[in-house]
Image (cartoon, helix red, strand yellow):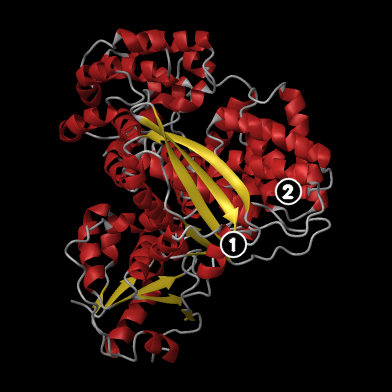
């Protein structure tokens, strides 16, 4: 049982060796071993060592802040109240760890340890913490950071830099009391207190906010005090209250309201439908809705509150409503509504930089056919960026929109990389900059690097389903099935988790043993969900052959669909000729962005010989697709690219080496 668990990035190992020697010279026992970072099969050993150590030193550096392993270990150490931070090169700890003082070791090259570090370690004497309660379930260490992050409130960033007619945005203290949810239905009323506690727990870690204890809140509510009276008695600036309404036999509607205790005024309300059983999915949706509303209206989470704006109340309310919809932009209707609201905002408040920035951002994140006539929307996009940056040259949201939209709207993949790189350099901890960088890296085929940025963006906005979807989609381009299982375990109760696991068998390297191990439980979770029973039955019969690449006819249900998976399925279980026939059908359907579906070295890849056919080349005709192909080829990213006949042999050798 070591005194100290040492967490670091492998690139820093030379300095860590000197640090380890100095710690041992000072009389501490250590647990550190860089080879354990070679794979997640060592996660149990790492977790056990961390749990048993008296202190956890996290050595932050430019490399460490990008390491998922280091961030996960730091999260677990913080949760156990034994984190000791230091900085090897002056790099500040990432967001979420800056409340812990980090000893600056920039100029330390060996010898006696700095007094500040020894003080943080207890002056050389470390008392082991009491063992965790056996009743507390043990979670994999690699998931710890995300598990903590899931309780943060999510939403869209509100840019305030240089806002005309405003003072600098000042975060006002927010303290929230979540009242027990009420219901006229006796059974549902009994669930109200538990649901309010779940809401409190879900919102508890949002930055810029403190929570009032549930026991105090329940006691005040039982006395039928007014909102103002509760605010005075508990010191709460805001209340979250709600009702659970029965709808038929199996469903409910939950009405949530956010109240300013100083004025007694309701400042936000929403209605969420769900299962009468009050499922984890409903709880997540309630936490998400409340978190997004508080982020937009109160500045909790990672956003800042707009201060001193002189725009009209109509324009500002439309802006706030649009922000909530932007945060849910995976829904096309929300995206279109947000676009229309922001068009109205820019008309009512032409000098309001955040309105123009948000309009550019929603356009950048929409397909070219979704919001109206393409050329018209493209002009709106460029005008919005130009106006936002003229009013506020440092506006992060406008710069992010410019970087994200450079490729899909202008076909300039080089500009997208340059803009994203400049933005992340200026704002390395901003979720919008991280998202822009992730998207650009994904476009050019640097998927593993992109994943780190997707992870960081999600950690800052963990209730955003769109950010979660972006991360999952990215992972399928480079990850493993084992890694996918760990990734999905972070959000085991998410509604789409079974579908993503199913897709893992299709796209990644899960073998037949994985299928037999997981399929029975997966079927139970898929039944009654978004996948029809007929599809489940077809998968049950066909997937084993697909996974093994054994001969089997492609199910007619999928042949009728004629989508990219039809081509891949035909290639794996029938042969190249059938795959080529399905590829021609796909071209006839004009499937959107079809070529990108095959840019992979994973299970969904097609053979180099098939990629050299004119039919495959036809997938990448057109300005945008050709830009992507040319950039990747120029930088040696060959996964799935169309090939010339004389390139086939070299590509076969590359893939054979990759498979070893």
Q: Position of residue 261 (x, y in %)?
A: 60, 60
**Residue 574 shown left or right of residue 290 in the figure:** left
Q: Secondary structure at mark 1?
A: helix
**Of 179 and 50, which appears nearest the observer?**
179
**Of 567 and 529, which appears nearest the observer?**
529
Q: Quadrant of residue 606?
A: top left
**Of 475 and 142, which appears nearest the observer?**
142
Q: Position of residue 293 (x, y in %)?
A: 57, 48
10 Å crowding of disc 1: few (<14), some (14-19), many (20+) = many
**Of 449 and 84, which appears nearest the observer?**
84
**Mark 1 vs mark 2: which is more N-terminal?**
1
Locate the C terminus and report the quarter of the image it occupies: top left
Q: Position of residue 199 (x, y in %)?
A: 42, 52
Considering every residue shown, the one lying at the far front of the view is 223
**Residue 71 shown left or right of residue 309 in the figure:** left
**Residue 190 shown left or right of residue 412 in the figure:** left
Q: Quadrant of residue 360?
A: top right
**Residue 575 shown left or right of residue 412 in the figure:** left
Does the image show residue 301?
no
Q: In the image, what residue occupies the spot 21% across and 21% down? A: 540
Residue that label 2 marks? 354
Q: Position of residue 47 (x, y in %)?
A: 24, 63
Question: Could you tell me how far apart the alpha carbons at marks 1 and 2 are, in whole angstroms?
Answer: 32 Å
Residue that label 1 marks? 228
């Amino acid at each position: 049982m070591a005194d100290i668990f040492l967490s670091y990035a492998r690139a820093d190992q030379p300095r860590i060796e000197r640090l380890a020697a100095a710690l041992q010279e000072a009389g501490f026992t250590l647990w550190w071993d860089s080879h354990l970072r070679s794979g997640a099969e060592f996660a149990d050993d790492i977790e056990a060592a961390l749990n048993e150590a008296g202190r956890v030193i996290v050595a932050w550096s430019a490399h460490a802040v990008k390491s998922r392993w280091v961030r996960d270990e730091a999260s677990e150490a913080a949760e156990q109240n034994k984190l000791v931070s230091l900085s090897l090169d002056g790099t500040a700890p990432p967001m979420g760890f800056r409340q812990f003082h980090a000893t600056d070791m920039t100029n330390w090259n060996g010898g006696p340890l700095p007094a500040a570090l020894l003080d943080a370690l207890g002056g050389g004497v470390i008392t082991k913490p009491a063992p965790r309660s056996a009743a507390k379930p043990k979670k994999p260490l690699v998931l710890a950071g995300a598990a903590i992050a899931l309780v943060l409130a999510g939403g869209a960033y509100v840019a305030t830099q240089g806002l005309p007619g405003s003072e600098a945005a000042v975060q006002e203290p927010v303290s929230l009391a979540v009242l027990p949810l009420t219901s006229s239905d006796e059974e549902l009323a009994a669930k109200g207190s538990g649901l309010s506690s779940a809401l409190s727990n879900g919102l508890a870690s949002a930055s810029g906010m403190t929570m009032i204890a549930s026991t105090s809140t329940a006691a005040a509510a039982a006395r039928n005090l007014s909102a103002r009276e509760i605010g005075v008695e508990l010191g709460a600036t805001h209340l979250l209250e709600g009702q659970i309404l029965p709808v038929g036999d199996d469903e409910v509607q939950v009405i949530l309201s956010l109240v300013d205790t100083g004025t007694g005024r309701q400042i936000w309300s929403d209605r969420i439908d769900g299962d009468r059983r009050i499922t984890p999915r409903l709880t997540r949706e309630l936490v998400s809705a409340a978190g997004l509303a508080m982020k937009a209206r109160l500045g909790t989470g990672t956003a800042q509150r707009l201060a001193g704006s002189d725009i009209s109340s109509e324009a500002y309310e439309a802006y706030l409503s649009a922000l909530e919809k932007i945060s849910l932009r995976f829904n096309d209707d929300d995206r279109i509504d947000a676009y229309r609201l922001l068009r109205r905002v820019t008309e009512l408040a032409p000098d309001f930089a955040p309105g123009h920035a948000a309009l550019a951002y929603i356009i950048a994140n929409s397909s070219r056919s979704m919001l109206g006539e393409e050329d018209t929307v493209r002009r709106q996009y460029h005008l919005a960026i130009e106006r936002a940056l003229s009013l506020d040259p440092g506006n992060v949201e406008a710069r992010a929109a410019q970087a994200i939209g450079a490729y899909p709207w202008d076909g300039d993949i080089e500009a997208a990389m340059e803009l994203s790189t400049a933005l992340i350099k200026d704002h390395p901890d901003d979720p919008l900059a991280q998202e822009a960088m992730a998207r650009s890296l994904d476009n050019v085929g640097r998927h593993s690097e992109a994943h780190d940025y997707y992870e960081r963006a999600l950690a800052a906005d963990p209730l955003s389903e769109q950010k979660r979807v972006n991360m999952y989609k990215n992972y399928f381009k480079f990850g493993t099935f084992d890694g996918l299982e760990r990734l999905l375990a972070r959000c085991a109760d998410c509604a789409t988790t079974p579908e993503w696991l199913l897709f893992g068998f299709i796209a990644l390297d899960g073998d037949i043993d994985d299928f037999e191990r997981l399929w029975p439980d997966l079927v139970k979770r898929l039944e009654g969900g978004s996948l029809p029973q007929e599809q489940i039955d077809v998968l049950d019969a066909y997937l084993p052959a697909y996974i093994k690449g054994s001969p089997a006819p492609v199910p007619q249900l999928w042949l009728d669909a004629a989508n990219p998976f039809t081509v891949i399925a035909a290639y794996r279980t029938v042969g190249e000729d059938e795959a080529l026939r399905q590829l021609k059908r796909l071209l006839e359907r004009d499937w959107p962005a079809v070529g990108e579906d095959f840019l992979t070295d994973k299970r969904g890849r097609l053979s180099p010989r098939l990629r050299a056919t004119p039919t495959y080349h036809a997938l990448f005709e057109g300005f945008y697709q050709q830009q992507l192909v040319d950039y990747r080829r120029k930088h040696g990213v060959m996964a799935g690219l169309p090939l010339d006949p004389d390139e086939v042999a070299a590509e076969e050798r590359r893939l054979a080496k990759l498979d070893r």
